[in-house]
Image (tube, rainbow, N blue to C red):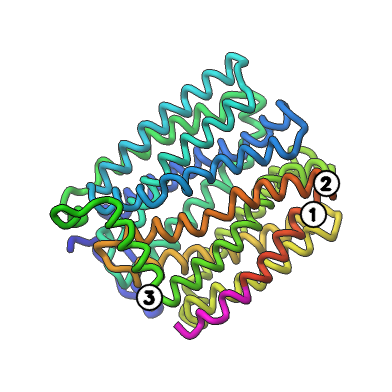
Amino acid sequence: MAAAQTVQSAAATVPAWRGGFGRLWTAAVVSRFGDSLRTAALPLLATTLTADPFLIALVTACGYLPWLLFGLLGGAIADRVDQRRAMWAVDLVRGALVAAFALAVAQGYASMALLIALAFALTTLQTLFDNAATALLPSIVPSAALGSANARVMTGQQIAGGFLAAPLVPALLAVSVAAPYGVDAASYGCAAALVASLRPEAPQRAAGKPGSTLRAEIAEGLRALWADRGLRGLCAATTVCNIGMGALIATLVLHVTGWLHAGHGGYAVTITAYGAGSVTGGLLAQRLARRLGRIRSVLVATVVQTGCLAAMGTVRALWVTVAAMALFGLMGMVWNVNLATLTQERAPEAMLGRVSAAFRTMAVAGAPLGALAGGAAAASWGLNTPALLASGLFVAAVGVLIPALAA
């Protein structure tokens, strides 16, 4: 298997920046920069179109729904095709869609229906892109470097999204309401060019067996996920947590601008704090994994995140929410790095796209429900209740994770 050169340190094996990993990392970071501009600007745009928390939450829900409809199919296709080609082709299409959306916004044609359609289309394409990216990384770096590679990619993405993109949103909106989406479209084009330039020696995944159907291959991926006790427990816990995350993310802009009365500036500070915490988590994820083990690290992260959510929902102060989101982001990065690495380490190589898709699809299934529940809770009981709802669900996830420690 072709792989980037690595360097040995006393602590761990890490991927070299030269070669395919450096370009893949840069593509991921550039794309996340643009995505973060869009995802931070969309809720603000939605609040100018409607004051209904349920409709605002519906945008987030429709951003998750394609995983339920197409996620498993995307994983099966990712195991059949050249992942690099799939990734750059998807980015070109996504760039064209966002560019068209930017033009519509600039011309004054923005509507809630258009926001919902864009969220649905982008996530539909993401089902193929994300599974292809997960399957491609082990062919770019050796298995011993997967943890460090995942940490570096995710940390770089958080720097781009939290430190660089989110604080720029108010400035870009001052220039033009469509500016964040135009930059996002350009970022997709840059990322596509970088992925397309990856060295051709990175191998393709083996094609399916002669006569094999996509349905049969999807079933193989589901069985492989179920057979691994650790991955099965992590998947169940992630599903429960994502119900809470859906509720929180869908209503966070209302929590900050409405319940805390902190305005758009407060929302930008909150998102930036989350990014700063995530960067710190990327630096600490491998250390915690070596000390505690990967599954135990995820358990500790979930316990800490539960406390953060409870604080956000009970203390009506911007500084508490900012501090809680920073710590929440730190532990979220610990969770994500270890989760991605465990999947890449434990899933059969030829089925990595399908196992990843099965995990994501089952885990994401709770997010649309959470987004709708969060919107309904905010409308009925107050804008702080989604954070409290999420806290309770994270407690349930801790109970699900404990049996997985024996895996």
Residue at (47, 69) in percent of width and height: 338
Circle 3 SS class: loop
Is 336 colored magenta in this rendering? Answer: no
Is 402 colored magenta in this rendering? Answer: yes
Q: Residue 84: x and y, percent?
A: 27, 46
The part of the image, by quadrant, that contains residue 166 is: top right
- Give the residue number, with chain letter if any, for mark 3: 12
Tell me if label 1 and label 2 are in contact, CB under 8 Å. Answer: yes
Disc with the residue nearer the chain's start (1 vs 2): 2
Disc with the residue nearer the chain's start (3 vs 2): 3
Disc with the residue nearer the chain's start (3 vs 1): 3
Which numbered circle lies on residue 385?
A: 1
Residue type pointed to by label 2: Ser
Q: CA distance from mark 1 to mark 2?
A: 9 Å
Is 240 above or below relative to 97?
below
- Give the residue number, with chain letter if any, for mark 2: 380
Q: CA distance from mark 3 to mark 2?
A: 50 Å
Depth check, front residue: 161 or 44: 44
Q: Nearer the viewer, mark 3 or mark 2?
A: 2
Specify the principal SS of the magenta part. Answer: helix
Residue 202 visible (yes or no): no
Q: Is residue 389 left or right of residue 9?
A: right
Residue at the extreme top of the image, as rendered: 107
Residue type pointed to by label 1: Thr
Q: Which residues are magenta?
A: 398-407
